[in-house]
Image (cartoon, rainbow, N blue to C red):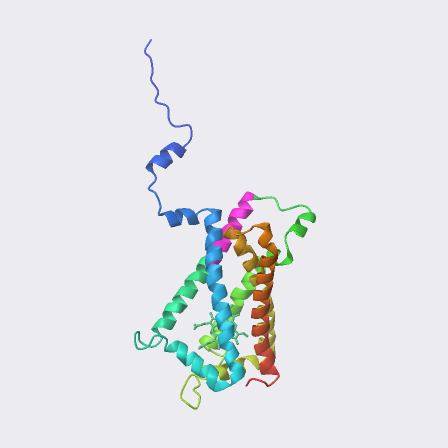
Amino acid sequence: MAQTTMKRGPVSGTAIDRATRRRRPFLIDLYSTAVGKKYVMAITGIGLLGFVLFHMIGNLKMYFGAQDLNHYAHFLERLLYPILPEKYALWLMRGGLATMALLHIHAAYTLTVINRHARPVKYQSERDYQVASFASRTMRYTGIIVLLFVIWHLLDLTFGAGSVNSYVGTKDAEGLKDVYGAVAFSLNRVPVAIFYVLANIALGTHLFHGVWSLFQSLGWNNPRFNKWRRAVATSFATIIVVGNVSFPIAVLAGVVG
Ligand code: HEM
């Protein structure tokens, strides 16, 4: 009887896949894992924290008067001039900032999708919620509020788009962009001022948990450090919220403007 020799394929596709698949660059490979995404969230988060801190410190110049704030904005536009033409360094920083923000959002979104797949059935018991703090449970929502705030904020104070802020583009007595006047114009509108206050409280909650968990993501989570982690997260979030919330209050109180 003729014997039929059947060639047996691999048990699963994995063996062939591994052999034939072209290797992706290491960083892309790492980013496809949950751990890689957490790294990206932590590293871009540190960059964004730096921006938020320096932005708040820069804005404190409004307490020294219009000239100081407008000169500061002008200084940023002329950063590295004449090595680079005016505004080039500023645009490079804007590019870096936008890239970090996009990566941060993409990693957050894709991590949420991975977590949903890992746990298709929602937590059933109330008890589980006690484990996660209020800040950690609300990261997604505070993140979305901050994103919506930034979109409004750019239309308002950077672009002065349409009727959002008709003052943007006005020059001061020295012929410089009157950033001080634009801030006063914007925050003198009570609903806008209230939105700034609420959005910055959401930002503070987001920052608190963000700072707390970036230690975890980077592997610095020895229980001995937890007291310090909490102190650093609380101090950072408080400094940002107090500084930023003071601006709309100062404008409405007539201290600025
Ligand atoms: C009450 C608090 C704040 C005030 C008074 C304020 C003020 C300003 C002003 C005046 C500008 C325009 C600067 C210029 O055209 O030279 C600006 C730009 C900007 N702000 Fe704020 N800001 C505040 C809070 C925030 C927060 C909380 C964020 C982020 C979470 C943020 C993100 C930005 C960004 C991304 C830009 C664009 C920077 C650029 O393109 O150069 N700001 N802000």
Give percent across and percent down for residue 222.
Answer: 56, 50
Asked whether residue 140 appears in the rendered view, the answer is: no
Left or right, residue 176 beside residue 82: right
Q: Position of residue 157 (x, y in %)?
A: 48, 77
Q: How many marks?
A: 0
**Of the pair 211 and 187, the residue shown nearer to us:** 211
Q: Is residue 50 left or right of residue 242?
A: left
Residue 69 seen anywhere in this rendered image of the structure: yes
Q: From the image, which quarter does the N terminus lie in?
A: top left
Q: Foreground residue, 12 or 75?
A: 75
Vertical order, 40 against 200 (above or below): above
Residue drawn at the location 49% of the way across and 56% of the way down: 42
Task: Kindly indicate the quadrant of the structure image that contains residue 176.
Answer: bottom left
Let me know if residue 241 is in the magenta part: no
Q: Quadrant of the C terminus?
A: bottom right
Q: Position of residue 162 (x, y in %)?
A: 47, 78
Which residue range is magenta in the image? 104-118
Main structural element of the magenta stretch: helix, strand or loop? helix
